[in-house]
Image (tube, rainbow, N blue to C red):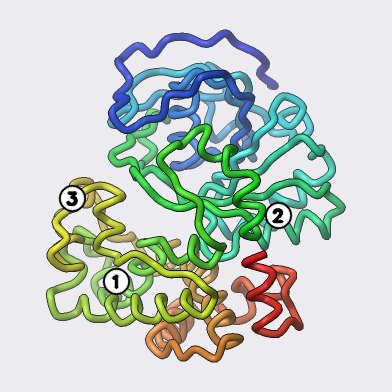
């Protein structure tokens, strides 16, 4: 059954606004997805008074939300917030919104672009809510190939540490206070910055999409920490992923990968802040070392290890960050041996051909270009 407009209601519990933006006027916003990030984003935007629509695959998987037209949240956002509509038809959602947040897994971006393409119009703007490396480029190219309009595509990181509860509510245990956003090029980022800052005023524009994609602690940590604990995870032994996943010595793996991230970023005219400082800007922590930072992020005390090796921490982060990182690195003649080893081991463990399935320069519309040409495109 299709659901249509409802009036907004006030939250039944006070909204924690200590880290939340205060917007001056109502926006018509669409959210693609129904998982953790999508529900947290819906609660946050509705708490700010915006008119929120959701596009989902299957209304039957979220019966409480689709029937009541509201999403309940606890933690950093507290309350029950009304939605404008929850639908399965892209045309119906897009007819009611101006800004579209894509809050699906990053591996679904091409499919989402193809489904939205026939119904997007020139006034629409798209924000990817966890772009990884090159997400905006991939989405823009997929949209073009599907005959969609030339519209701004922006990306940022998923800002919420959150988990769907058994009653369909969303527990938001953490909210990143700062990160970067980017368009497909520097000029797009500058021109469309207000699209993101309207909702998240503390976010800052990246100098290019490489800087944005590598300013991501999950992209650095997820895959190598999984590999460092592969036996325990494969035995389904639960442990605190960030607190117990590494020791003061084994964190050296992350520090080497961080060096490689920095080298690739520099090759494309960007610089990265230290990852320990990134964690501090995200959530607040002790920055005396990267290991100490990981062990003092408050909400990481709830972050359990993945239930299996076939998890997004390995599959998605290799597919959507480390594989394209390799391609950008090779184009710039930058060696990244530790990242290469992580990709190789991930392929062995999962039996996935990441080189065949991961993001590529071709998917970004950069195939056949020289390093100098790609540098110019990204920094134009």
Whether 372 is drawn above or below 287: the answer is: below
Point out which mark residue 301 bears: 3
Callout count: 3
- Where disc 3 sits, the SS reads helix
Q: Nearer the viewer, residue 233 or 210?
A: 210
- Side (left or right) of 115 relative to 340: right
Disc marking residue 225: 1
Count residues near mark 2 (Cα–Cα under 10 Å), then give few for <14, some for 14-19, many for 20+.
some
Judge left or right: residue 289 versus residue 329: left
- Which of the marked residues, 2 or 1, is nearer the chain's N terminus? 2
Q: Are marks 1 and 3 in contact (CB under 8 Å)?
A: no
Q: Between marks 2 and 1, how big is the CA–CA gap?
A: 29 Å
Quick check: 196 above or below 240?
A: above
Q: Quadrant of the N terminus?
A: top right
Query: Foreground residue, 311 or 241?
Result: 241
Question: At 74% from the left edge and 33% from the top edge, which residue is drawn?
Answer: 89
Residue drawn at 19 percent across, 79 percent down: 250
- Residue 182 percent coordinates (x, y): 56, 54
- The residue to which callout 2 is attached is 111
- The answer to which of marks 2 and 3 sits earlier in the sequence is 2
């Amino acid at each position: 059954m299709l659901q249509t407009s409802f009036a907004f209601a006030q939250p039944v519990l006070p909204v924690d606004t200590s880290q939340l933006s205060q917007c001056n006027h109502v926006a018509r916003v669409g959210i693609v997805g129904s998982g953790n990030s999508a529900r947290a984003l819906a609660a946050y935007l509705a708490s700010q008074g915006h008119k929120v629509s959701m596009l989902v695959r299957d209304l039957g998987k979220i019966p409480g939300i689709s029937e009541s037209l509201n999403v309940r949240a606890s933690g950093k956002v507290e309350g029950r917030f009304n939605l404008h509509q929850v639908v399965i038809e892209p045309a119906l959602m897009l007819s009611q919104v101006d800004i579209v947040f894509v809050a699906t897994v990053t591996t679904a971006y091409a499919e989402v672009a193809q489904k939205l393409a026939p119904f997007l119009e020139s006034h629409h703007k798209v924000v990817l809510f966890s772009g990884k490396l090159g997400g905006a480029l991939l989405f823009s190219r997929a949209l073009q190939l599907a005959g969609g309009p030339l519209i701004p595509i922006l990306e940022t990181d998923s800002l919420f540490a959150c988990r769907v509860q058994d009653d369909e509510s969303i527990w938001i245990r953490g909210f990143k206070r700062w990160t970067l956003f980017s368009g497909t090029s520097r000029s797009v980022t500058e021109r469309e910055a207000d699209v993101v800052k309207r909702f998240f005023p503390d976010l800052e524009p990246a100098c290019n999409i490489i800087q944005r994609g590598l300013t991501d602690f999950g992209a650095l940590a997820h895959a190598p920490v999984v590999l460092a604990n592969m036996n325990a995870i494969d035995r389904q032994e639960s442990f605190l992923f960030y607190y117990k996943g590494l020791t003061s010595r084994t964190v050296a793996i992350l520090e080497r990968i961080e060096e490689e991230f920095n080298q690739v970023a520099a090759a494309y005219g960007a610089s990265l802040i230290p990852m320990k400082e990134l964690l501090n800007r995200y959530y607040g922590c002790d920055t005396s070392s990267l290991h100490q930072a990981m062990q003092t992020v408050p909400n990481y005390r709830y972050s359990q290890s993945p239930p299996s090796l076939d998890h997004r921490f390995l599959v998605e982060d290799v597919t959507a960050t480390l594989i394209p990182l390799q391609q950008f690195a090779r184009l710039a003649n930058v060696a990244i041996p530790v990242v290469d080893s992580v990709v190789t081991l991930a392929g062995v463990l999962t039996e996935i051909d990441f080189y065949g399935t991961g993001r590529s320069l071709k998917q970004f519309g950069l195939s056949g270009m020289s390093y100098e040409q790609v540098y110019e495109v990204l920094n134009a």
